[in-house]
Amino acid sequence: MTDFNVVPTIPAKPATIARRDPGSQPLATSSRLLPKHLRPHVLAFHRFLRLGNDIADDAEMEPETKLAYLDALERALTSGQAKHAYLKPAVDLRLSLQATGVQDRHARQVLRAFRRNAVGARCHSWSDLLLYCRFAANPVGRYLLELHGEGAGAGPAADALCSAVQILKHLQSGRDDWVVLGRCHLPLTWFDEAGISVERMVEAETDPKLRGLFDKLLDHTDRLLERAATLPGQIAHRGLRIETSVLLAQTEALSRRLRNRDPMAGRVALGAHQRVAATMRGVARGFAAR
């Protein structure tokens, strides 16, 4: 297993941070389905995660500097004090957590995953990938459940959904992650079993062996989605339940599309009609769940 514990370093002067895809954080920051009074808190959580992700994914920054920024971000979150303007999202989130009574462990857990990304750690097995998702994605679902006053019983199904979303995003951006950042979240042992090198991720087209590896990843992800299927029925809040049902339906649709499209040739995403259809399925499932 890859170790998530990273030795703290001294904060450096803020640098320009290159923004990339915010990654796995499935936060509906402007959804009308979420209560109006909670949207600013969801936005504060999103902005904090976005800043941490931007730091970890900056291709021009040295790992030690990334770790310094992430350490400073966590200190600002826990202390409520920031010496630099770029840390404002941490202070804002602390105020939000104090107002809502939500614990800060969710945000701090995601920072552990960002530290792993900052040093270019790779996933060696499926269990290692799930461990990564435990910190990179699952705290997002746990945060939203706690914010909406949901019980802990929905946690495991939420974890399964968040992990599935995370893994599919890794498959979508796998080539860019490798070429730009030298990062691979796909299990390295699977490359060995397929008789290919991870260097194959530089190719602009998927060959049969790599396609087999991708399909294996999708098989495992679909099993996560099967476990996540019970989640809408475990959520009492109607808006969050419908939002979750839509995310589940869209993720299921994306998994199917990734089986029929080549993620190495370009980013695979749902088309407009597919997204609308999945959204309608999700809304219907959300209303029928309780």
Image (cartoon, rainbow, N blue to C red):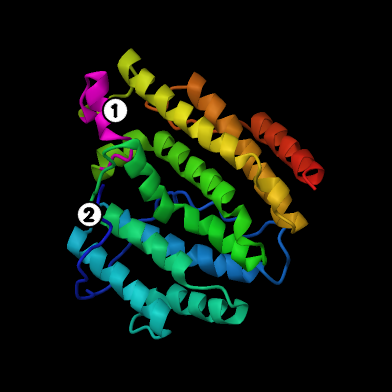
* Location of residue 1 in the rendering, given as x and y in whole percent from the top left corner: 26, 47
Question: Residue at horizontal 65%, vertical 59%?
Answer: 30
Residue 91's place in the image compared with 7, above or below, is below
Please identify, in this view, whether the residue under mark 2 or under mark 1 is nearer the observer.
Answer: 1
Residue 205 in view here: no
* Location of residue 131 in the rendering, given as x and y in whole percent from the top left corner: 37, 48
Residue 30 in view here: yes
Please give the residue where the numbered disc 2 appears in the rendered image: 119
Give the magenta range.
Answer: 183-198
* Location of residue 6 in the rendering, given as x and y in whole percent from the top left corner: 23, 63
On the rendered structure, is 50 left or right of 83?
right
Q: Amino acid at mark 2?
A: Val
- Classify mark 2: helix, strand or loop: loop
Residue 191 colored in magenta in the image? yes
Question: Residue at horizontal 20%, vertical 59%?
Answer: 63
Label 2 close to label 1 by CB (< 8 Å): no
* Location of residue 36 in the rendering, given as x and y in whole percent from the top left corner: 73, 68
Which of marks 1 and 2 precedes in the sequence? 2
Residue 143 colored in magenta in the image? no
Check residue 190 in the rendering and tell me which mark sits there, or answer none. Answer: 1
Residue 205's quadrant in the figure?
Answer: top left
Q: Amino acid at mark 1?
A: Trp
